[in-house]
């Protein structure tokens, strides 16, 4: 019998071809920077110094910039700065207005429009901040904001009120106060370094910070949230990996949204981190024209596993001001999840979450697999839509009523 092509389950016309085209790893290439020496190109500081940061520079490099993008880029530095590393810029397809890489980093004028339900601090971080730069929302862990700078700026950033300092938020983390708070709260066992991007700190500064945190006896676990592996894989040097390795258990959550971001350069950088014993997870944001299809998501999560990264979360896009043009409905998110669960490796299936607006924390949202549940039995549906029953009495608890016969599976 001919084996079924697994990419056929994706439910959209053309999806199987799209899925197959996104699976290979390719280099970002050199593009406009082909004359730059290899040593400079591989130097993360060179990449930072040569970022694209203005509308005029962007238009020179990409004459296909639309009027909406040009106007957005002109205004970007009053809301969330424009910055794109040369490496990441090379992933943009200038011929495609809906290029998934383009949507993530090139501003649009729609960013200046704020819907009634949008906010500048959608996760309520400022109201859970006992000292500047520290968010203590969950009982046993804190978010430690290290810097307000990133290698490039994501147009949907939930922390755009402070990153890049375009709005004059004037973020100044005070490491002494942040560390003193953690040291004084023995219930905190887990610290997540984020920002801005913690891996933009130089090696010495990062090592000093990690050492101070590790010296606190009740800190069991350190985490770093970073978009650097995808925006600037050159930063993942052997020296950086050797430093991170000293602070185990230390996990790293990367941020990647589309399979085209997983280049050979990124795969190699992630391999260096994994070889240093760092468990890697990925966080994606569900975004229109970026990853709002099962074919794209499935190719992405499968490529992440090939890079030794566990897909961890898919976030429903936070209600950050000016992000409506990038938002996808929760219904569509659930449909995508339904086409992942059971249709690919369990390790490849992330948890879809909504960060509850105003500071309620992450809430998992799942397609419905439990159809009904009473004292006798639970009726469940599998990934193919076939219905099964499982007897609650299977735990040996005596029942007053005898169990009815379990039905043969049928399909919903
Ligand atoms: S890398 Fe993270 S913090 Fe920086 S702009 Fe993107 S989402 Fe925001």
Image (cartoon, rainbow, N blue to C red):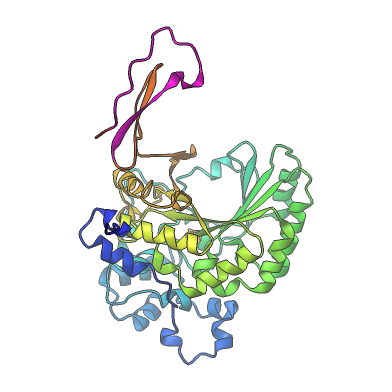
Q: Is residue 79 visible?
A: no
Which residue appears at 46% of the width and 38% of the height?
363
Q: Is residue 399 magenta?
A: yes
Identity of the residue furthest to the top in this view: 400
Left or right of 369: which side holds 267?
Answer: right
Identity of the residue furthest to the front in this view: 1
In the foreground, 303 or 247: 303
Residue 287 rendering spot, x and y as whole percentages:
35, 56
Q: Is residue 93 magenta?
A: no
Residue 299 rendering spot, x and y as whole percentages:
38, 61
Which residue appears at 41% of the width and 78% of the height?
90
Q: Quadrant of the C terminus?
A: top left
Tag count in the figure?
A: 0
Left or right of 206: which side holds 395?
Answer: left
Identity of the residue furthest to the left in this view: 13
Asked if 90 appears above or below 301 in the picture, the reply is: below
Residue range of the region highlighted in magenta in the rendering? 385-409
Asked if 8 appears above or below 152 in the picture, the reply is: above
Which residue appears at 35% of the width and 67% of the height?
22
């Amino acid at each position: 019998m001919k084996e079924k092509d697994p990419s056929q389950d994706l439910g959209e016309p053309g999806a199987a071809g799209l899925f197959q085209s996104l699976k290979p790893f390719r280099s970002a290439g050199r593009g406009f920077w082909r004359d730059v020496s290899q040593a400079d190109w591989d130097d993360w500081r060179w990449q930072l110094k040569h970022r694209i940061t203005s509308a005029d520079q962007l238009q020179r490099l990409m004459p296909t910039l639309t009027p909406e993008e040009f106007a957005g880029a002109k205004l970007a530095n009053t809301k969330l700065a424009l910055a794109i590393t040369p490496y990441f810029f090379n992933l943009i397809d200038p011929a495609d207005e809906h290029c998934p890489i383009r949507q993530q980093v090139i501003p649009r004028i729609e960013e200046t429009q704020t819907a009634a339900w949008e906010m500048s601090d959608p996760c309520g971080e400022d109201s859970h901040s006992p000292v500047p730069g520290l968010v203590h929302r969950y009982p046993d862990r804190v978010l430690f904001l290290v810097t307000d700078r990133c290698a490039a700026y994501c147009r949907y950033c939930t922390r755009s009120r402070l990153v890049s300092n375009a709005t004059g938020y004037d973020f100044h983390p005070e490491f002494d106060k942040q560390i003193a708070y953690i040291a004084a709260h023995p219930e905190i066992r887990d610290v997540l370094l984020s920002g801005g991007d913690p891996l933009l700190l130089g090696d010495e500064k990062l090592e000093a910070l990690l050492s101070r945190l590790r010296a606190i006896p009740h800190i069991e676990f350190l985490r770093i949230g970073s978009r650097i592996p995808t925006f600037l894989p050159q930063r993942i040097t052997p020296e950086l990996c050797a430093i991170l390795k000293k602070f185990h258990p230390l996990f790293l959550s990367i941020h990647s949204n589309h399979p085209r971001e997983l280049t050979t350069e990124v795969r190699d950088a992630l391999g260096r981190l994994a070889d240093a014993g760092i468990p890697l997870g990925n966080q994606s944001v569900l975004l229109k024209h970026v990853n709002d299809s099962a074919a794209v998501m499935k190719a992405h999560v499968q490529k992440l596993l090939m890079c030794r990264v566990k897909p961890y979360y898919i976030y429903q896009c936070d209600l950050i001001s000016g992000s409506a043009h990038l938002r996808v409905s929760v219904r569509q998110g659930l449909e995508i999840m339904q086409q992942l669960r059971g249709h690919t490796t369990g390790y490849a299936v992330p948890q879809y979450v909504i960060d509850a607006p105003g500071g309620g924390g992450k809430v998992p949202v799942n397609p419905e697999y439990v159809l009904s549940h009473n004292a006798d039995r639970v009726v469940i549906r599998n990934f193919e839509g076939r219905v099964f029953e499982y007897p609650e009495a299977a735990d040996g608890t005596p029942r007053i009523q005898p169990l009815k016969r379990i039905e043969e599976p049928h399909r919903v």
